[in-house]
Image: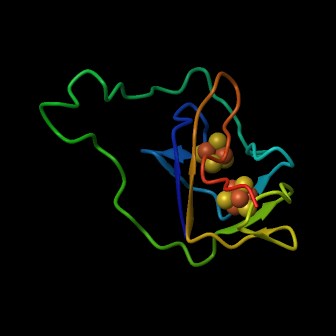
Amino acid sequence: MDVVCRKYSCIYNEKSKCSRKNLQIDKIAYCDDIKIDNNKIVEDVSKDMFSHEPDVAPYHHCKNMNIMCEDKDCIFNKSGECFSNGIFVGSEKNRAGCNSFVKR
Ligand code: SF4
Ligand code: SF4
């Protein structure tokens, strides 16, 4: 299970990976554990993304990552738990939505 997240200002975001051991996703597929730190220094990868690869954390299989999800409309939701191999979380204003949602 790998959780890639674009909400870089969240305290749990480490170079695009979520560092938590568990996640709660709400009934409209937004991350409930988001905790924004407006003082966090976030690298702007867009400035030199064409000259070198962005400094992102390598893939790591997190056996312990457990995602509970209240969005029952998603095909990966089984009894309130996410059974996807990994999810991609996006960024909008002060929210972070699961972009891996697939409607049943
Ligand atoms: S917004 Fe959610 S998924 Fe993203 S780093 Fe924060 S806790 Fe993890
Ligand atoms: S992929 Fe589906 S079940 Fe998994 S966290 Fe996202 S919305 Fe919930």
Q: From the viewer's perspective, tell me whether residue 88 is left or right of residue 68.
A: left
As drawn, the residue found furthest toward the front would be: 104
- Most foreground residue, 71 or 55: 71
Lateral position of residue 40 relative to residue 73, left or right: left
Percent coordinates x, y for residue 89 in the rendering: 59, 46
Quadrant housing the N terminus: bottom right
Q: Residue at x 16, y 30 (%)?
A: 50
Q: Is residue 102 above or below residue 78?
A: above
Does residue 67 appear anywhere in the picture? yes
How are the colours assigned in the image?
Answer: rainbow
Counting labels gives 0
Judged from this view, the residue extending furthest toward the left is: 51
The front one of 44 and 98 is 98
Q: Name the residue located 67 percent from the left edge and 53 percent from the top edge.
A: 101
Please report the residue visible at 42 percent of the width from the left and 44 percent of the height from the top: 15
Residue 93 locus on image (x, y percent): 65, 21
Q: Nearer the viewer, residue 95 or 73?
A: 73
Residue 12 appearing in the image = no
Front residue of 84/74: it is: 74
Image: 33 above or below 63? above
Q: Where is residue 47? Give x, y as percent.
A: 26, 21
From the viewer's perspective, tell me whether residue 64 is left or right of residue 73. Answer: left
- What x and y, as percent, mark residue 100? 60, 53
Residue 39 location, quadrant: top right
Q: Is residue 28 left or right of residue 87?
A: right
User: Is 33 rendered above or below residue 48?
Assistant: below
Q: Quadrant of the C terminus?
A: bottom right
